[in-house]
Image (cartoon, grey):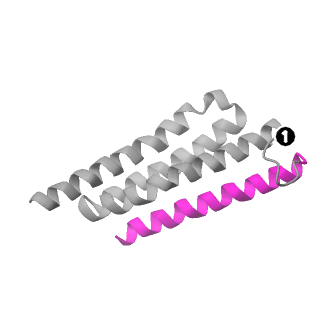
């Protein structure tokens, strides 16, 4: 489970870094707090950060469930795919929000595997 915890920490660090990018964009594009709208590029950074937060809400428990009931190594690998997907999502969304699909898909697929696999593993453990 150590690998699972390391990958979760990396995902949280990534989320923090995305927040720093939002702050920098806020200054660069002169969007004063508490506004969350203004310059389109600022809004893109904000949406990437917010969407990542939404994903983390289900990613972290999914990692823990899958790691505990199925495979810690598998969970860690899927978690690294999630992190890579989030980086791609950031890059694509900032360039053109309409092209964000690949990054979104690469980060959502591991989440679904983690959650469904974790659920299946927990059920198997309960009845087995």
Q: Residue at left 28%, top 50%? A: 117
Which of the image's four quarters has the N terminus?
Answer: bottom left
**Percent position (x, y) of residue 36?**
78, 46
**Percent position (x, y) of residue 72?**
31, 63
Looking at the image, residue 28 lies above or below residue 4 = above
Q: Is mark 1 on a helix, strand or loop?
A: loop
Looking at the image, residue 1 lies above or below residue 109 = below
Q: Is residue 6 left or right of residue 65?
A: right
Determine the image quadrant of residue 3: bottom left
- Residue 34 appears in view: yes
Specify the farthest residue to the right. 30
Which of the image's four quarters has the C terminus?
Answer: bottom left
Q: Residue at left 67%, top 43%? A: 47
The stretch drawn in magenta includes residue 97: no
Q: Residue at left 64%, top 44%? A: 90
Q: Residue at left 44%, top 59%? A: 60
Mark 1 packing: few (<14 Cα in 10 Å), some, or many (20+)? few
Identify the residue position indicated by label 1 in the image. 38
Looking at the image, residue 67 lies above or below residue 97 = below
Tag count: 1
Determine the image quadrant of residue 70: bottom left
Residue extent of the magenta highlight: 1-30
**Percent position (x, y) of residue 91?**
65, 41
- Residue 76 appears in view: no
Specify the farthest residue to the bottom. 2
**Residue 69 or 106: which is nearer the viewer?**
69
**Percent position (x, y) of residue 19?**
70, 57
């Amino acid at each position: 489970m150590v690998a699972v915890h390391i990958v979760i920490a990396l995902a949280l660090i990534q989320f923090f870094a995305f927040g720093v990018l939002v702050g920098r964009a806020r200054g660069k594009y002169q969007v004063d707090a508490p506004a969350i709208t203004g310059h389109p590029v600022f809004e893109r950074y904000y949406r990437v950060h917010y969407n990542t937060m939404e994903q983390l809400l289900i990613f972290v428990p999914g990692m823990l469930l899958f790691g505990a009931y199925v495979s810690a190594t598998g969970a860690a690998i899927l978690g690294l795919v999630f992190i890579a997907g989030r980086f791609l999502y950031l890059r694509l969304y900032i360039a053109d929000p309409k092209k964000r699909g690949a990054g979104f898909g690469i980060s959502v697929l591991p989440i679904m595997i983690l959650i469904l696999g974790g659920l299946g593993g927990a059920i198997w453990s309960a009845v087995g």
